[in-house]
Every structure is written in C-alpha cells, then in structure tokens.
C-alpha cells in the first residue's frame, strides 16, 4: 500500500533519497514484516536478518567514509522512518548501531580509531552498542556514576548501565564513564573483556524483538587507545545525542504511518451494518485527523533534517520534534487500534505491536516532559531543570 503523501512531500526529495527509502521499504516488506511478529512474541532477536541488513550497505547512516554511505540527514530520517514503519525493534537495533555507536566514534574518535572500528561496523561484521543510561540515571544522564581510572596502559571501568540496546550481543560497547578529573569520556569495551557482564532484560511489553541489557562493569580493563580521543566532557556526548534525536522524530512518524495505513485498509474491507466501516462518519473523522497529523509530522521532519544538513539544527529544535511527534504518534496508534476493534489486539494484524512499541518511543532519548523543558529553556532563557540560567 502506498504511504500517505497528501501534500506531495516526494516533490521535495532528491531522487537518491527516494531510491534509498524505497529500497529499505521493499526490504522490510520482503524480509521483516512477514516474520517479525513471531520474534516479537517470543522476545527473541532475529539474528538471521543481520547479514541481510548488512547487504543494504546503509550502516553508519550519515557517517562519511570508512565504508558508510554518508547519507544526508533527510535520507537518514527516511530510513529511520521505514525501519519503524516495519518494526520498532529492528529500528532500534539499526539506530543504536548506526546512529549512536558509529556516529560517536566518527564524531569523537581520532583518525586511527575511526579506521580501526568503523569499516567492520559499516559491513556489520562488528555490532556496536551505546552505554550511557544507568539504573539511577536516565533523564539526568549527566550525573552518571560509572567511573574510569587510569592504571598503566589501561583504564579500569567500574559501574552499571541499564537499557543498553545491543549490549548483550555487541562486539564494541561504547561505555560513558567519569574519569579521575571528573569529566565524562567514552571507552570502547570489546566483546569478551573480563569483568563485563550483560544480562538481557526480560518482561518488556515493548520492543520485544530487540535485546536491551543491564550491564555490570567490575574492574573492566580497557586499553588506553580505546578511549575516544576527542571526548573530554558530557558536552561532547550531547553532540551525539543532539544529532541522533531528530531520527527519533522520524521513527515516531514511521510508527504512525504504519498504523494509519493498517487502519485505513481494515476500515475499507471490514463491513458492519451492511457497509464498510470506512463509510461511517466517526471512522472517517478519525482517519482524516490521523492523516492531518501525519502530514504535519512529515513536513516538520523534512524541514528539521534540512536544517541539520545545513548545520543549523539546534538541540531545542530536535527536542521540539521529538516531543511533538512522539505524542502525536502515540495518539494515532491508539486510534488505529480502536478502528481495528478486537482485531487490533492480535499480533497478526501488526497494530498491536506498533501500539506497544510506541510506548517505548514515547520515552527513550528523552521523555516528553524533559523535551518540553529543553524547549522551554530555549524560549525563556531559564532552566526549569536546574533552576539556573544556562550559560550562553
């Protein structure tokens, strides 16, 4: 089914952007959608898809060189939306590997480190993870407690992390820790390093087909050359988060789009009281409002990504999009589930999975409330988080 493009957004896209979007879409329709429900229900990661995703040649997203495609921010957003349109779990796996782990190395590593790690990650021979969130520090990640101390030609890491996507399967886990100088640095922990223990989190009701891990770091020794050379404070970490947050807005759009498409298709074929339910006023009102929100989200995503490509996107701009899109997508997915009625809670119809996964998207990479406070700080000059004026 053709995705909604009510305002002809495709006219604003470059041919190569459309080609890559459609290539990912075709892959998802062929490889992801037919099999993902079984993995989601069993809470198992679909390892069989990894080499097939690798063949697409899109790992690394906007990373330039080192085997990565060097996408525009618009293209990266379109790709993120297509993964989410098919499945939020696969979108999370790809986003953690390409947008968080690889971009951190590209932005904050030196040339030797980029050459050492990125080519194999671009081929997906090595998988990456991003270890920032801790059991006691989510929204206030800047207060992280994981420590790194220098000992000869190594750093010794001690602490704990939580909600680390790919953390149990990754070959390179980027752990953020506070050094002896009090500043935050990035340390690449290689698979099999003694003292690194990752436990897959169970009991999740969202993103069940991707594994997040609770990580314990007990005197984990990391070679000095595995510390990212160009990261000296949490401000540097924020650069990565700012550059990846806009893709979460696209992911919310992808989930909303899929849910709208499924609701429309169901409404056209489902008959009650002698006619398709799409012919009833209440259903048409829902569909029209869903389409209106999706159209506004599409245009906002496109403009934000164009600003990112021009180097003009700010953290508050990305937060505004994430805040707006997550809330709007959450409502759209709920309306889709309502239109499907009882069928809306069956995995075979896909909306139930999107409905559950949207709850995770609503929270991760900054909750709705925190995004609002970031925007509020930008427009007032006053920080409601710290109660202090931000440094200009």
Image: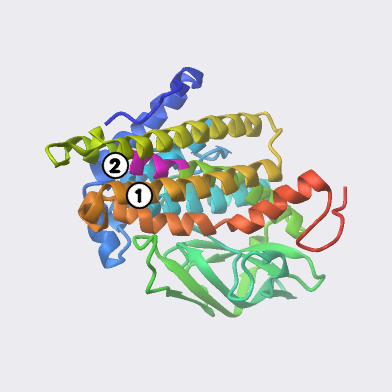
Q: Is residue 337 left or right of residue 238?
A: left
Residue found at x 14% / y 41% = 273
Which of pointers 1 and 2 lies earlier in the amino acid sequence?
Answer: 1
Percent of width and height locating residue 376:
74, 49
Residue found at x 71% / y 47% = 375
In the image, residue 21 lies in the stretch drawn in magenta: no
Percent of width and height locating residue 254:
42, 41
Q: Which residue is mark 1?
A: 87
Which span of residues is magenta-colored? 253-262
Q: Nearer the viewer, residue 117 or 386?
A: 386
Q: Is residue 166 left or right of residue 223?
A: left
Q: Which residue is mark 2?
A: 263
Percent of width and height locating residue 177:
68, 69
In the image, residue 254 lies in the stretch drawn in magenta: yes
Q: Secondary structure at mark 2?
A: helix
Q: Is residue 54 left or right of residue 153?
A: left
């Amino acid at each position: 089914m053709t995705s909604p493009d009510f305002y002809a957004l495709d006219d604003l896209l470059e041919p190569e952007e459309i080609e890559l979007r459609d290539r990912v879409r075709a892959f998802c329709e062929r490889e992801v959608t037919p099999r993902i429900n079984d993995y989601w229900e069993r809470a198992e990661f679909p390892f069989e898809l990894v080499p097939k995703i690798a063949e697409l040649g899109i790992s690394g997203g906007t990373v330039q060189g080192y085997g990565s495609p060097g996408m525009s921010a618009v293209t990266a957003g379109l790709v993120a939306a297509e993964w989410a349109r098919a499945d939020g779990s696969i979108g999370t796996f790809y986003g953690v590997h390409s947008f968080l782990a690889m971009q951190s190395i590209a932005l904050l590593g030196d040339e030797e480190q980029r050459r050492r790690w990125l080519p194999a990650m671009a081929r997906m021979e090595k998988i990456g993870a991003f270890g920032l969130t801790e059991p006691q520090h989510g929204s206030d990640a800047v207060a992280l407690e994981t420590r790194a101390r220098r000992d000869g030609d190594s750093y010794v890491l001690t602490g704990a992390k939580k909600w680390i996507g790919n953390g149990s399967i990754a070959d390179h886990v980027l752990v953020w820790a506070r050094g002896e100088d009090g500043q935050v640095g990035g340390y690449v922990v290689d698979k099999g390093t003694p003292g690194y223990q990752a436990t897959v989190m169970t009991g999740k009701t969202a993103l069940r087909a991707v594994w997040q891990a609770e990580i314990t770091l007990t005197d984990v020794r990391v070679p000095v050359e595995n510390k990212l050379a160009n990261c000296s404070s949490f401000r540097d970490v924020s650069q990565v988060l700012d550059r990846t947050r806009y893709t979460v807005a696209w992911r919310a759009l992808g989930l909303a789009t899929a849910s709208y498409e499924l609701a429309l298709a169901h409404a056209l074929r489902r008959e009650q009281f002698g006619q398709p339910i799409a012919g009833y006023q209440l259903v048409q009102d829902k569909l029209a409002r869903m389409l209106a929100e999706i159209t506004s989200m599409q245009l906002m995503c496109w403009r934000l990504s164009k600003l990112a490509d021009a180097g003009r996107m700010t953290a508050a701009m990305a937060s505004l999009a994430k805040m707006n899109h997550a809330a709007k997508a959450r409502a759209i997915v709920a309306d889709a589930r309502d239109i499907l009625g009882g069928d809306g809670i069956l995995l075979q119809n896909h909306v139930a999975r999107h409905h559950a996964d949207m709850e995770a998207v609503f929270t991760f990479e900054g909750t709705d409330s925190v995004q609002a406070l970031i925007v509020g700080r930008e427009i007032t000059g006053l920080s409601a988080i710290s109660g202090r004026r931000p440094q200009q």
